[in-house]
């Protein structure tokens, strides 16, 4: 049963999602949360922040399994064109082999996407990633109702992180996902400040927002996963 059918059944039965969840407790499967770091710099501040969020998500419940996809160092170009995303021409690059399988087979139960702020906007790599996951919309909305949380890292305290988060959230709404923020202090998503020469763990406030984001995505994924 996919997320959308699960929710429809819960509502139709008048039971609510929590009751539907507990009814299926005996057969509960793992809840898989995938993080995607969209910095071209592998393993740097964005990837670290995503890992912090994933670790916090994992600590919420033993059902949660996590996976980090670090796009750093991968060669991923934007869409191959076409009048609509459905008509995009296939491209052979790292996306097909290194990224797509983790998002399609199986589809994640929760997603955390992160990008550095580049000129107060998402990275080009992030934009390319968002264009290429159009394949998850056609012919069926595979990510429908998937909870998605977003984070951004900037070199300045107010370097456009919330703008980047909003851009990514807006793009993901085209998948009919459930956009979630974080717990208090991270209501829009996680905002981190790379003020310590790439040692992002020293940004205590930002790291806490990443943790709160991970917890929120985990809680939503647990509610929405059959
Ligand atoms: C081309 C470029 C543009 C940037 N523009 C901004 C910006 O507008 N605001 C900001 O706070 N930081 C900006 N930065 C800094 C990065 O967001 C910051 O170093 C971030 O931690 C990089 O993420 P990473 O460590 O995952 O690569 C820029 C960096 C680059 C390379």
Image: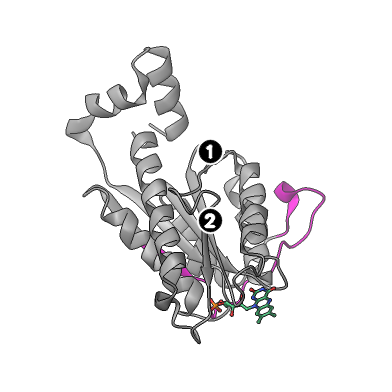
Spatial CA span between label 1 and label 2: 17 Å
Pick the quarter of the image with the N terminus.
Answer: top left
Residue stretch rendered in magenta on the structure: 67-89
User: Between 155 and 219, which is closer to the camera in this rendering?
Assistant: 155
Q: Is residue 71 magenta?
A: yes
The structure residue drawn at horizontal position 51% and vertical position 48%, both measured from the top left corner, is 187
Tell me residue 122's x, y (percent): 66, 66
Q: Which residue has dot 2 on it?
A: 150
Q: Which residue has dot 1 on it?
A: 144
Residue 17 visible in the picture: yes
| Front of the two marks 1 and 2 | 2
Kindly give the residue lying farthest to the bottom in the view shown: 197
User: Between 177 and 119, which is closer to the camera in this rendering?
Assistant: 119
Tell me residue 177's x, y (percent): 55, 41
Residue 201 vertical position relative to residue 179 in the rendered view, above or below:
below
User: Between 104 and 58, which is closer to the camera in this rendering?
Assistant: 58
Q: Quadrant of residue 152?
A: bottom right
Name the chief secondary structure element in magenta: loop
The label on residue 81 is none
């Amino acid at each position: 049963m996919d997320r959308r059918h699960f929710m429809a059944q819960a509502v139709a039965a008048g039971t609510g999602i929590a009751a539907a969840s507990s009814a299926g407790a005996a057969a509960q499967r793992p809840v898989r949360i995938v993080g995607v770091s969209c910095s071209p710099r592998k393993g740097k501040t964005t990837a670290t922040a995503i890992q912090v969020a994933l670790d916090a998500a994992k600590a919420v419940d033993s059902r949660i399994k996590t996976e980090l996809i670090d796009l750093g160092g991968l060669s991923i170009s934007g869409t191959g064109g076409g009048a609509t995303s459905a008509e995009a021409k296939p491209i052979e690059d790292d996306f097909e082999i290194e990224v797509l399988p983790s998002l399609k087979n199986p589809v994640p139960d929760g997603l955390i996407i992160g990008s550095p702020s580049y000129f107060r906007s998402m990275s080009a790599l992030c934009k390319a990633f968002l264009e290429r996951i159009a394949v998850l919309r056609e012919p069926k909305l595979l990510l429908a109702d998937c909870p998605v949380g977003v984070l951004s890292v900037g070199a300045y305290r107010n370097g456009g992180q919330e703008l980047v988060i909003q851009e990514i959230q807006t793009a993901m709404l085209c998948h009919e996902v459930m956009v979630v923020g974080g717990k208090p202090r991270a209501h829009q998503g996680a905002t981190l400040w790379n003020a310590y020469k790439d040692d992002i763990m020293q940004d205590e406030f930002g790291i806490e927002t990443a943790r709160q984001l991970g917890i929120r995505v985990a809680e939503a994924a647990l509610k929405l996963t059959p």
